Image (cartoon, rainbow, N blue to C red):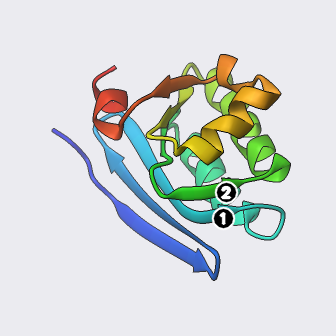
Amino acid sequence: MDRETVGSVNRGRLQVDVRTEGRSEIVKPAGELDHHTADLLRVPLEEAVEQGRVRLVIDCSQLEFCDSTGLNVLLGARLKAEAGGGGVHLAGMLPVVARVFEITGADAVFTVHDSLEDALVH
């Protein structure tokens, strides 16, 4: 039986929607992830891990920008999720965001999927 919860937070340039589907915590940031908005993503990721939901799926399909602060939030979540036996899956990255991951080499440490649907089945 799938447990499903839904939540949302918004601070101008970034909105983050959160829901639980099966064994995955799906977090969907929309807008710009940077120094000013990073906590909007950090907090729900940390709360999920603290509650034992360590399979984190980040739906990046509406993430338009990600700077080094945003990247560090995702890397920190990855470490915490892996410590709990899970991981972070990135799904549906737009080319501009995917480029940040390629340039920094971060794409090598995350499981990257073409779509949210693909991330949920793998």
Q: Estimate the spatial distance between the alpha carbons at disc 1 and disc 2, rounded to whole Å.
A: 5 Å
Q: Residue at x 64, y 80 (%)?
A: 11
In depth, the one of 90 and 42 nearer the eye is 90
Q: What element carries label 2?
A: strand
Find residue 67 and report its horizontal and vertical position in percent. Answer: 79, 52
Number of numbered discs on residues: 2
**Residue 109 in sight here:** no
Q: What element carries label 1?
A: strand
**Residue 116 in sight here:** yes
User: How many neighbours does mark 2 have within 10 angstroms: few (below 14), some (14-19), or many (20 or more)?
Assistant: some
Quadrant of image for the C terminus: top left
User: How many neighbours does mark 1 have within 10 angstroms: few (below 14), some (14-19), or many (20 or more)?
Assistant: many
Judged left or right of residue 120, residue 7 is right
Q: Residue at x 76, y 37 (%)?
A: 76
**Vertical comparison of 90 with 64: above or below:** above
Q: What residue type is labelled 1?
A: Glu
Please identify the quarter of the rendering in which residue 110 is found.
top right
Q: What residue type is labelled 2?
A: Phe
Dot 2 corresponds to which residue?
65
Judged left or right of residue 64, residue 109 is right
Dot 1 corresponds to which residue?
32
**Vertical comparison of 75 with 11: above or below:** above
Q: Do the residues labelled 1 and 2 touch (CB within 8 Å)?
A: yes
**Vertical comparison of 116 with 87: above or below:** below
Direction left: furthest residue = 1
Mark 1 or 2 closer to N-term?
Answer: 1
Find residue 105 and report its horizontal and vertical position in percent. Answer: 77, 22
In depth, the one of 52 and 105 nearer the eye is 105
Q: Of the numbered discs in the image, which one, if any, rests on residue 76? A: none
Q: Residue at x 57, y 19 (%)?
A: 85
